[in-house]
Image (tube, helix red, strand yellow):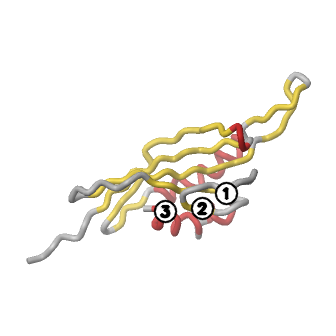
Amino acid sequence: MLTILYRILSVSDLGTLVQGRVYKLNKPQGLFECVVINALPVSQAQQQIGTANVNIYVPDLAQTREGKPDQVADTVRLNTLTSMALPLLTVYETGYDFAPVSMTLIEQPESKSHYMNIRIDFNFFPAPEWS
């Protein structure tokens, strides 16, 4: 799953527009924009099912509220990058398919950023064994 998603996202317009890069598993330290892909284990049934997460990180905007400094989500940038990602995350290929099933905006105060978590359901269809 990770390799498939990485291959698709890293060479896409999203992969070149995002100010950082596309990463597997973990976001590197620092305050910057990037896309991080991680996955949960795949089932071992005949039709294998798995779940992946595509997290789009965008630094917060600094602003002043009631005379005090504050951080707010850059919803314009998050929406732009999410809109670019969604069409790339619905794929029907021989052997597998995947599509988004949910999206959630998550605050990450320690890094002064927010990220859009896009949950993806994968289905793998093993090739039939011929006698």
Residue 23 numbered tag:
2
Mark 2 is surrounded, within 10 Å at the Cα level, by few (under 14), some (14 to 19) or many (20 or more) other residues, namely some
Of the residues under marks 3 and 2, which one precedes in the sequence? 3
Of the residues under marks 3 and 1, which one precedes in the sequence? 3
Q: Quadrant of the N terminus?
A: bottom left
For the residues bearing labels 3 and 1, Cβ distance under 8 angstroms: no
Q: Residue at 34% of width from left, 56% of height from top?
A: 42
Q: Where is residue 120? Give x, y as percent.
A: 44, 50
Q: Where is residue 76? Give x, y as percent.
A: 71, 43
Q: Where is residue 113? Give x, y as percent.
A: 71, 43
For the residues bearing labels 1 and 2, Cβ distance under 8 angstroms: yes
Q: Which residue is mark 1?
A: 28
Q: Quadrant of the C terminus?
A: bottom left
Q: Is residue 53 above or below residue 11?
A: above
Q: Which residue is mark 3?
A: 5
Quarter of the image where one finds residue 25: bottom right
SS at badge 1: loop
Q: Residue at 42% of width from left, 52% of height from top?
A: 40
Q: Residue at 78% of width from left, 35% of height from top?
A: 71
Left/right placement of residue 66 relative to residue 49 reads right
Q: Is residue 95 above or below residue 45?
A: below
Tell which tag, 3 or 2, sits nearer the viewer: 2
Tell which tag, 3 or 1, sits nearer the viewer: 1
**Nearer to the camera, 106 or 26:** 26
